[in-house]
Amino acid sequence: ISNSLKLALTRLGYQAYHMEDAVSRGHLSYWARLRTAEGGTDPEEVTRVLDLLSSWGYNASVDFPSCVLYKEQMRRDPEALVILSVRKSAEAWADSFMDTIGRPEFTEAGGKPPITWLIPGMAVAKQWMFETAGFKDVLQVTKAEAVDVYEKWAAEVKATVPADRLLVHQAQDGWPPLCRALKVADADCPSALGEPYPKGPNDRENAILVL
């Protein structure tokens, strides 16, 4: 669903940052610096990486790694819309997560050659992302924990973001809610032009291609 949302935002004129950008453009070494030796987040490195994203021309972000910095991004841009992209259920999200980046073999592969040579910073960046999202051990993630993290994350976002700045969105909701929240004129909304809401590449296929 994050791929679909990125495609939708791109269609509406935004340059959206996604995990694919972080991997393909060699950015994970920057994200790895956010994790402190104690397992926390270095605020100076947060500022640095968000400054870099801005300097590279990004004006929107979806998915890991940037989604776990939504509070910091809200402080930088008090008028920004926060989109909570959800699945039909926590279990559905957990199934997808456990079949892609949550799979232990994917995590283990990211910490060993040749991945450490090809994608520097992946293991540490992934550890930081998972820990910041609420997972306890990146090598021992279970579906039950994934369900719990999803539910707590969604509840936290809803409790943190003011209602007038939050859009809770599923891909099947399509264009209209997204256009309204981003103040796109009805006549300019892709749905009014007969365009279907985009369907992004399969997450599992992308993960396999990377690893």
Image (spheres, rainbow, N blue to C red):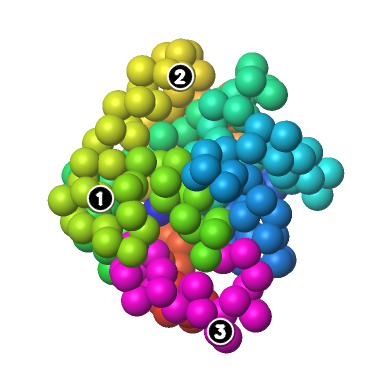
Residue located beneath label 2 in the image: 161
Image disc number at residue 73: none
The residue located at (76%, 40%) in the rendering is: 48
- Hey, what amino acid is under mark 3? Pro
Residue located beneath label 1 in the image: 146
Distance Cα–Cα, label 1 vs label 2: 22 Å
Q: What element carries label 2?
A: loop
Q: Mark 2, residues whose alpha carbon is within 10 Å: few (<14), some, or many (≥20)?
A: some
Distance Cα–Cα, label 1 vs label 3: 27 Å
**Which picture quadrant has residue 134?**
top left
**Which picture quadrant has residue 190?**
top right
**Which picture quadrant has residue 116?**
bottom right
- Hey, what amino acid is under mark 1? Ala
Image disc number at residue 113: 3
The residue located at (60%, 28%) in the rendering is: 72
Q: Which of marks 1 and 2 is nearer the N terminus?
A: 1
Residue 189 shows in this picture: no
Q: Say which of marks 2 and 3 sits in front.
A: 3
